[in-house]
Amino acid sequence: MIQSSMLKRAALKRSTAVAAVTLALVSPVAFAQEAEGEEPAQAIVVTGSRIARSDVTSVAPVSIVGADEFRLTGTVNAEQVLNALPQVIPGTTSFSNNPGGGVATLDLRGLGAQRTMVLVNGRRYMFYGTDQTVDLNTIPTFLLKNVEVVTGGGSAVYGSDALAGVVNFQLRDNLQGLEVGVQQSLTGQGDGRRFNANIAMGTEFADNRGNVTVYGEYNKRGSIFASARDFSRVALADGATGLIAFGSPGVPQGRLVVAPTINVGTTEVPIAAGTNYPTGAFFATPGTSRPYTPADSYNFSPVNYLMVPQERWLLGGYGDYEINANAKAYFEFSYVNNRVENELAATPITQNVDFQLSRIQGLVSASDFAQLTQIAANQQIAIATAATPGCAPVTAANPTGVCTNPFGAFRAGTSDFGALQPGSARVQVNTRTTGISSRNASDDRSAFRALGGLRGDITDSIRYDAYYMYSRTRNSQIQEGNVSRSAFTRLAGNGTCNVFGAELLSDSCLTSISILAQNTVISELQVAQASITGDLFKLGTSNEPIRFAVGTEWRKMGSEFIPDTALSSGDVVGFNAGQPTEGSYTATEFFGELSVPLIQDGFIHRLEIDGAVRYSDYSLEAVGGVWAYSGGVRFAPVRDITFRGQYQRAIRAPNVGELFGGQSVGFPAATDPCSLASSAGNATIRDLCIATGVPSSQVGSGRLLQPATQIQGAFGGNPNLSEEVSDTWTAGVVIQPSFIRGLTMQVDFFDISIEKSISTAGGGVNNILNLCYNVIQNANSAICGLISRDSQGVISGPPFVVSANNANLASLETRGVDFQLDYATRMGFGVFGEESRLAFNLLATYTDKYTFTPLVDLPEDNVQCAGKFGLTCGDPIPKFKANSRLSWIDGPLTTSIRWRHVGATDDDEGGYVVDRIAAYNLFDLSLSAEVTEGATINVGVNNLFDKAPPVIGSNAQQSNTYPSTFDVLGRDFFVSAQFRF
């Protein structure tokens, strides 16, 4: 980072200053070479170490995002800039509607947001939920000085969580006077309006012994529905020869399904053969059915948000006061209120219902009533067959050899329903409650953070710093559009709720089944830290002293999720049900760091070794006392070239949600292998499907067995989790040729491996299904035991779900190379000044390896995600990703072009219509003009050529694509102005 003192000494003050900041993604060493005759730069602290250095080149790779990158891209929320970095795989963003959550997270290397440590001014920041992850919406981007991104484990320096790396948001600390900013953004289609206004005021007081800055910001983002874009207007899925319009089989008209036959012991009993019901009876005409076809599916896409709306207020302040020559008090305070909505189509319901024929006769046609009457009679035959002695082998536990009643008692939500009675027909109902409303989750999140500390000098070369921080986040979520599963099952069965056609649910039915649900999440973080840093002594071979840092830290992390009765009972259909979560734990730590310059300006230019160690004592019994440590070397044979390398052992203690999370239900995208047509022709898989609860007639039946692309899973905590352990190796070279001034090149290799990785058991719903049916292939295995099906064989919802609680059973490894090129030069001419400058920056990452092993006991059964996307790997992890900017600075005018590149990726499983996403390129253009000494105007357009996202079918994340990775807005304009007084 260019220091202000260097800018003041530059020959062309204005041009050089603008060039420096418009290199927006600046290498930390890009301007480290000192001009002839200049004094050495003042020692500063670079992220990744607590030791102040005069040379900011560190042993670990550090990339710096300058403040002007936010200004030149019209960015208000930090994730928009950071997700474009090649080291980052997008986390939750403003385009995350399902799943959503109203937050913005950061995911370095695709290893998970929970493994990326986010700091503000080098200190921990407030987190928003039970997973202890920072919401980037709470950081005031308009006050940024820069953002520093460090690769690899940082636990030895910062403690738990820094397995993938550290991202440090540095705020300006020298604000003087009043600054006001305003920005307006609008897409080329005239929607997605975004408005931002901010104000900050800084002043010195008490004869310049104190400085204080206060600030405020208001941001409002409008919504965009998926119906507003051609690529997302219609829900797509894979067809026989290409993508087809194919929504959800949960249709407002009603789709009622009964298996054509079922197996009772060794006897195959006809149930619905010869009726409309095996493929689904579709009531296009109220009361009268015909066989369901894929063309009848419900297009849920247009009423889903593509970009979620947001309204945010942010207030805060920070400052310091020099008590005396050896003590300076400082404080930081921030308060954020962030309101975000997620909206989905009306609730789809899949539920077995015992219809009382006498109560529904008037609701259906004579033909349908006859079919249902025949189904009811056949079901009673199946029950009688099961009760016949000899149906099953005779055992001590079953001396008469009867079979289990195939239509026995079941539970729906909070209610128990008895075995099927004569005069009733058990039918799987697939409908959608459009008469209630769309599902809307409104998050109102308030967070505050207060920090106070004292720092100063012990001697001329030794300094101290001590502080205490407390933060608290409270989120209240109100959910509209939910349905009571138990009430629906009861009222549909007795005819109160008419499910035999569209929009037939009466007002009394809707009132009885609709639920307004709410939940609250409260999270707290406390940190107390004291450290001493400074110089020891010089070796005879070096001009700089050995430097050290030692200290201690205490942290308390706590969080709770408080659902209302409807959510905690599991009776909710619509949004995810979940049980309460509450827990906290503490960590007491001691740390030390040492930097030893062995040789400086001797027979070689520089040789330096670094080391750090941290001991952490957790109150968690399964974690206890753990060590983190690192060691690195920096070797510069000549001034123009520096080699560097580092090893880091890092740890991550489980978070509150992973430890104490109550059972909750989620809807991840997944594939049921038993639904695939190929399973019917594979004897092993067919027999396994039948053994795990699929009727023989349903094996390979496609949408009949898996009605939607999502499969419900149950997730929850595990108090016996231990810590994750990672090993990171980095090695690289920095080249700054003295014969090409202004040029810096960096190449860094990284290898990050994580053992005892905490993940959902078996790697999640999709991988559990894959392991059971395609790998382990044993119905009695623990993995297959996690799968529960209803009497139709469908994983239809609680209690028929895939159980995927947390466990330390997985491993992760990623490996690759980061490239960075920075170049700035004078052009020798100018239009608005005597001379102009050209600045170029390129950041790129080649990911050679990304391996996810769901079960370390099956090391050969792993998922390779480098260059992949899909239901297991998630968002695309391209092998090559790049971000580049070219800026021309001519006096007060800066013209800048940015190129964003996401390399081609392939589906992680294959067999889909879209198995490959081609390389994706975007170009952005911006202009920045300093119209007066205190006023700057910026205009720009992102996605200059209106590039559409790739369109994907059944393997898409949402809106027929991956909206956090690829641009879904289209051409997007912004204009902003900053005024300084």
Image: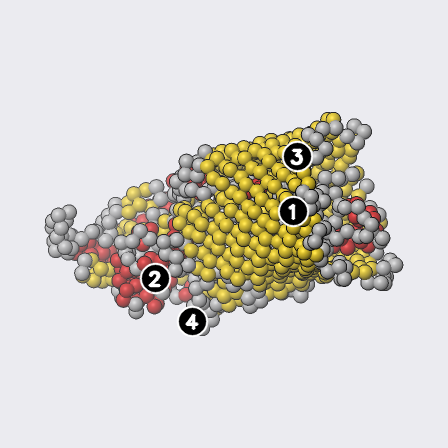
Of circles 3 and 1, the one toward us is 1
Of circles 4 and 3, the one toward us is 3
Residue type indicated by callout 2? Asn
Q: Is residue 936 above or below residue 535?
A: below
Disc 4 is placed on an element classified as loop
Of circles 1 and 2, the one toward us is 1
Residue type indicated by callout 1? Leu
Q: Give me the residue at 53% from left, 55% from top.
A: 751
Real-space CA distance between mark 1 and mark 2, rounded to the nearest whole angstrom: 57 Å
Identify the mark nearer the N-term, 3 or 1.
3
Real-space CA distance between mark 3 and mark 1, rounded to the nearest whole angstrom: 38 Å
Res 771 seen here: yes
Q: Please provide percent x and percent y for residue 905.
A: 52, 65
Real-space CA distance between mark 4 and mark 1, rounded to the nearest whole angstrom: 67 Å
Of circles 2 and 4, the one toward us is 2
> Label 4 belongs to which residue?
240
Along the line of sight, the residue nearer the viewer: 262 or 4: 4
Disc 2 is placed on an element classified as helix
Identify the mark nearer the N-term, 1 or 2.
1
Identify the mark nearer the N-term, 4 or 3.
4
How dense is the environment of label 4, judged by Cα within 10 Å: few (below 14), some, or many (20 and up)? few
> Label 2 belongs to which residue?
774
Residue type indicated by callout 4? Ala
Identify the mark nearer the N-term, 3 or 2.
3
> Label 3 belongs to which residue?
332
Q: Left or right: 576 with respect to 229?
A: left
